[in-house]
Amino acid sequence: MSIRTTTLPLVAALAAAFGASAAFAQETVKIGFTGPLSGGAALYGKNVVNGMEMAIKEINAAGLEVAGKKVKLELVALDDKYAPAEAAINARRLVQQYQSPAVFVPHSGGIYAMQAFNEQEKFIVMAYSSTPKITETGNKLTIRIPPTFNSYIEPFTSYEMKKFGKKVGMLPGDHEYAKNWTQLFGPAWEKAGGTIASNNPMSYNRSADFYSGVSRVLAEKPDVLFVGGPSEPTALVVKQARELGFKGGFLIMDQAKLDEMAKVTGGLAPLEGSIGVLPVSYDERLGPKTFAAAYRKAYGADKDPTTESSYNYTLTHALASAMKLAGSTTDAAAIRAKIGEALTKMPKETNAGEFKGVDAVGGTIVDPLVATVEGGKIKPVNLSELK
């Protein structure tokens, strides 16, 4: 009897301790990223990573619970140097070694490479690229994060033609995304009554001297230059074109951001007459404005957030919410199916991209804002105003 009396409190204490440890047990889920973290596009990749890091810190601080279990998210970011083959190798490592249920990738070449096997290996491709083909493939485990760029082509063309003229010189990057933009832009410019003076793709990721390529295009005396790639090399192309005497306008692909470019060109004056997407810092809507303030608090008062940061921040939050709605951190199909619902239920302060959901083919539903540079200032414009 005495043995039982002395043993019962010990058993109860052990049971309580075991129950407490079980209650506080935490699952760690690795969220993958593969993208350029070195080379000419390093800043572009880092902007994506910054947004994801911000979101993960907020999610972990608030506490995430999936199917009654506490979950901690952890980012595993790998450098692929903007190379599709490296992106595929990294993705397999992230899935096999770290069991990542989703891999974020900010370039179309890498996205296509991963779409070749992600359905078989059961992970979500979180695709940050505006290339339409990404969701035209029918891949059921892909989310295209930004809107497709084809919505920009007609209004951008109309603006530049009216302001400067109908002769365009093409100086795009030679990466997959720029090739896709070029394939649609060239015919659209000609359909609008314009002519293509020359087309000279350049390696935006591996070069810092574009004078020879720019000189060749300027020799044809274009009214407008079509440029685009990561912000820093795109800005160098613009700067070198101005130094060589170009007086016309710039039609800028959505990958490059006007505020980041201005830091390289020495202000907005060299960008006069440009059209591109609206920088986050100039977006007065609640979600982007809240995010911009939080971003500067996290990374420095002089650091301007980009859509790479804000969009991937929002989709990282959506991914976590989708896990909760799906009741799983491992079932990629179930999580993917809940991302649209997660976006529609997201608090406005967290929805830094003003997303409205996901469409039938896996693209986010969002109304992007664009901008022109006029009188040395960035001017927000609705796409409908430009048509």
Image (tube, helix red, strand yellow):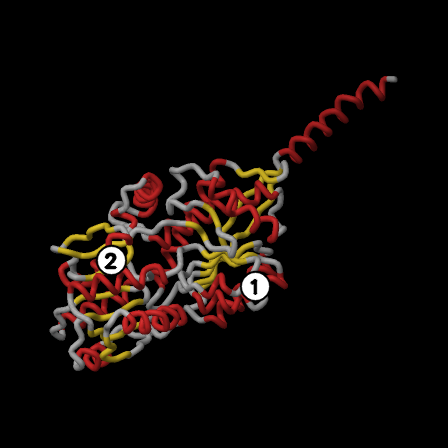
Amino acid at circle 2: Leu
Front position in the image: 253 or 384? 384
The residue drawn where x is 36% and y is 68% is 181
Q: Position of residue 345 (x, y in %)?
A: 48, 38
The residue drawn where x is 55% and y is 62% is 138
The reply to whether discs 2 and 1 touch (Cβ–Cβ < 8 Å) is no
Q: Residues within 10 Å of mark 2 (few under 14, many from 20)?
A: many
Quadrant into which the C terminus falls: bottom left
Is residue 7 placed above or below 174 in the rendered structure?
above
Q: Position of residue 335 (x, y in %)?
A: 58, 49
Asked where in the image residue 170 lies, by quadrant, the reply is bottom left
Front position in the image: 117 or 12? 117
Amino acid at circle 1: Arg
Quadrant into which the N terminus falls: top right
The residue drawn where x is 21% and y is 56% is 372
Q: Is residue 263 left or right of residue 363?
A: left
Q: Position of residue 231 (x, y in %)?
A: 29, 62
Is residue 248 placed above or below 20 in the rendered structure?
below
**Marks 2/1: CA distance?**
35 Å
Q: Is residue 81 left or right of residue 158?
A: right
In the picture as drawn, the residue positioned furthest to the right comes out as: 1
Q: Residues within 10 Å of mark 1 (few under 14, many from 20)?
A: some
Q: Secondary structure at mark 1?
A: helix
The residue drawn where x is 28% and y is 73% is 190
Of the numbered discs 2 and 1, the one sitting upstream in the chain is 1
Question: Where does label 1 land, which residue?
Answer: 93
Q: Which mark is residue 258?
A: 2
Q: Position of residue 167 (x, y in %)?
A: 20, 74
Q: Secondary structure at mark 2?
A: helix
